[in-house]
Image (cartoon, helix red, strand yellow):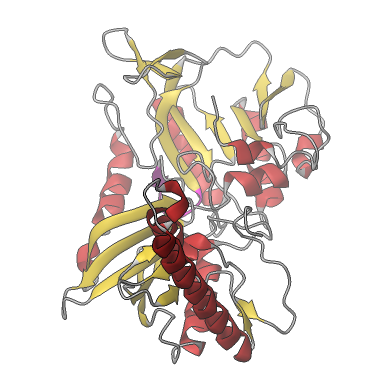
Amino acid sequence: MDERYDSYCAADPLFYDSLGSAVAQPTFAPARRPLPAGWRRESLDDWLIHAPDGERLPQQGWKVHVSATLANADRVLDTVWDYCIPRGLSFKFLRGPRTLLLRNSKYAARAASGKFVTVYPRDDAELELVCKELDELLTGEDGPYVLSDLRYAAGPVYVRYGGFAARYCHSPDGQVVPAVEDDTGTLVPDRRDPVFHLPSWVTLPDFLAPHLAARNATSTDEVPYRIDKVIHFSNGGGLYVGRDSRTDTRLVFKEARPHAGLDADGTDAVTRLAREAAVLRQLADLPQVPRVHDEFALGDHRFLALEFIEGRPLNKVLVDRYPLIDADATDDDRAAYAGWALDVHRQVDEIVRAIHSRGLVYGDLHLFNIMIRPDDQVALVDFEVAAPVDGHRRPGLRNQGFA
């Protein structure tokens, strides 16, 4: 069961539904292409499945995923269609642009992000040929990295071992999950983690070994920083606490994945990170705003190293200090809280006015982005949707409860 309720709010402005329902949605042009004789088309959730009549695939095996952006999706899909149909290869693809945007949005499931087309080779020999030929056909095409898969070469082609048929089992915590059969014939969870995983009983085909080695070659040793703690992950990248190895300065690192973490306008995490760095440099004279320490790349990912703000977000401090949940609170306690709350409000108002005076809109003011330092001084964090006031429009990414 998909418990991400937000993904069911996009199909209709009034009704809670799946994008794979009967509600009319724009589709990619190839979805309207006529099928040749002997082929069938089926709809399943967000996917349109295409397969030769009578095709019997193995129940599990290596599958090929192709990623794409909103800009090149029709072109990539045309290429895959023209490749698969004459070769009798079963394939499926996301039905339309809105579905692709949601699959690659900032808070989409990281393990499923990037998967635009799935091709089902019938054996390892066909797998190798499909990877090689599709990679050649799609050279130069962009697409988000499929975190659950192994990337083939440097293009938008990825592979993963998993189930073809819809089989299920119970996970260790009792959830019903997709399954594959292990070497004893037992159904076990088909792991779909946001990292490439090879089942213990499966041998990696020899032709994939160089690509696995290339994947493992990227290391944090390439930069003078170390990661000490993960704050959280999103589909756009991670947020970490670490240090500069040269000076031992404590820092926050914001990671951005290209073509992933899309907002409602289709802007990716890398673009937003660059904008945030530019805005923070424009606000560098404000002590309530984190300083930019560095910008750097690691593999295809971009990073922004920021001053570490010592403190806690306002929503947590508010709960600790709120006097009306304490039966023993006195009038003095309530008066002290009121004075503190008014002072926090004054500080936030002053910071926002200072940002406006520099021709910028903050755009993401809510309790989680207001940090309270140990001395009760306020700082603001997370400037990824801040922008110049001239030509400003409503941000494509925002906290719904405060927008």
Is residue 312 one of those drawn in magenta?
A: no
Whether residue 381 is visible: no
Q: Give the mark count.
A: 0
Seen from the viewer's position, the closer of residues 327 and 369 is: 327
Seen from the viewer's position, the closer of residues 322 and 370 is: 322
**85 with respect to 179 (left or right):** right
Whether residue 161 is visible: yes
> Which quadrant of the figure contains the N terminus?
top right
Vertical placement of 318 versus 190: above or below?
Answer: below
Residue at figure coordinates x 44%, y 80% from the top left: 289
Give the quarter of the image for residue 158.
top left
- Farthest residue to the top: give it: 185
Q: Position of residue 174 (x, y in %)?
A: 37, 16
Residue at figure coordinates x 60%, y 85% from the top left: 353
Give the quarter of the image for residue 3.
top right
Residue at figure coordinates x 28%, y 24% from the top left: 202
Q: Position of residue 8 (x, y in %)?
A: 67, 36
Residue at figure coordinates x 66%, y 19% from the top left: 52
Seen from the viewer's position, the closer of residues 132 and 256 is: 256
**226 with respect to 108 (left or right):** left
Q: Position of residue 389 (x, y in %)?
A: 69, 82
Vertical placement of 90 versus 353: above or below?
Answer: above
Write the start and end of the magenta stretch as one range.
Answer: 150-156
Q: Position of residue 143 (x, y in %)?
A: 55, 54
